[in-house]
Amino acid sequence: MTFPTIKQVRAHVVRGGGADYHDQGDGHWIDDHIATPMAKYPEYRQSRQSFGINVLGTLVVEIEAADGTVGFAVTTGGEPAAYIVEKHLARFLEGHSPTDYEKIWDQMYFGTQYYGRKGLVVNAISGVDLALWDLLGKLRREPVYHLLGGAVRDELSFYATGARPDLAKQMGFIGGKMPLHHGPAEGEEGLKKNIAELATMRERCGEDFWLMFDCWMALDLNYATRLAHRAKDYGLKWIEEALSPDDYWGYAALKKAAPAGMLVTTGEHEATRWGFRMLMEMECCDIIQPDVGWCGGVTELLKISAMADSRGVMVIPHGSSVYSYHFVITRHNSPFAEFLMMAPKADQVVPMFHPQLLGEPVPENGRLKATALDKPGFGVDLNPAVTLHRPYTH
Ligand SMILES: C[C@H](O)[C@H](O)[C@@H](O)[C@@H](O)C(=O)O
Ligand SMILES: [Mg+2]
């Protein structure tokens, strides 16, 4: 079976929502006094947008085959990622077969290793890799999850991330992950407020509903340890990304210091098999949470997941819409998925990358049947009402 070669790679940007899901309007829960490493500076404490969490914007990668078929994907990266795709990565794809995704990935990674390895460059590589898998699915007329080995269960179940776990429970989600609002700079008073918020949600949600804190890299080891032990009384299921992604030593210590039974999780800002090998070999966490649009794409997540499976470590990808759904449904060590509540008050289910994609599936009653993914590629289309801008060409 011969495949059409890749004719052109194009990189676009859009502003306002979409894959850079932190790029929201005023009054959104996702930018409401959430603890971050920048919260030590009072001027950057109220809003993450004030220090630039949404400065990159969305990257859209299109890969057009010689027969006119176009695969695409979206991730976080904006203009700088578009530059890398157009001026550097495109050369490894154009004129080659889309079935050569292993060789293409290897050349993209090692061709940029001297300035990449993590962060923006691997976001760009991930966007290209996801677009390649979308193209492969469209050419083979199969959903990506079929190309990954097929569903190991009939449906996905989700926990919800957002400010209202109580509403998430009513919507049928299996748990609620709350953003942590106060970091070390707000001292004991802030810690008490964090625990009071957890206590309120535990009261509203009852004893068995999963409740988690997402700490978004904001804490130090001592504060995280104190928070975990105070939160134990309210049945916190896991403490997420408490420390800097580079502090493997701190995570190893936190995992030892955490209360028995409480899970330590991290990984959304980690990248490649090498980064996740470090997390696992240093026994930093109980669950790894790679974002498939940031860690290297599907091609790399397959390697990361196999490593984790060999160690009995769960892989629960950071919320990344269809890109994680097509993966999670095929992995035994990914028993559930994350759904990010993108409605401003976290009071209704809306597509994660809204308004960017058409046909983006959403959980119903906290579940999504595998058959909902039964469309070629990742099964979504770009919304023509969302204007694409191609800042660079090659
Ligand atoms: C809710 C968190 O602060 C982040 O905004 C979220 O994107 C991420 O950490 C997550 O795990 O969903
Ligand atoms: Mg997180």
Image (cartoon, grey):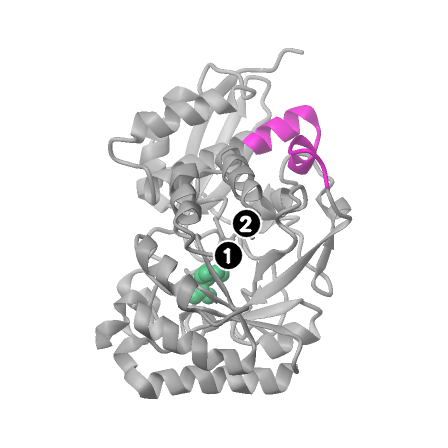
Q: 125 and 19: which one is in front? A: 125
Local packing at callout 1 (Cα closer than 10 Å; few below 14, some 14-19, many 20+) is: some
Q: Quadrant of the N terminus?
A: top right
318 to 178, vertically: above or below: above
245 to 33, vertically: above or below: above
Residue extent of the magenta highlight:
133-151
Residue denoted by label 2: 313
Relative to 247, 24 lies left or right: right
The quadrant holding residue 391 is top left
Mark before the other along the chain sequence, 2 or 1: 1
- Work out how far the residue at label 2 is from the one at label 1, CA to CA, in angstroms: 6 Å
Say whether marks 2 and 1 touch (CB < 8 Å): yes
Please provide percent x and percent y for residue 220.
Answer: 30, 68
Tell me the tag on residue 286. Answer: 1
Element type where label 2 sits in the image = loop
- Name the residue: 28% across, 72% down: 39
Mark 2 is on which residue type? Val
Look at the image and tell me whether residue 314 can be seen.
Answer: yes
Mark 1 is on which residue type? Asp
Please provide percent x and percent y for residue 169.
Answer: 66, 74
What secondary structure predominates along the stretch shown in magenta?
A: helix
Relative to 183, 169 lies left or right: right
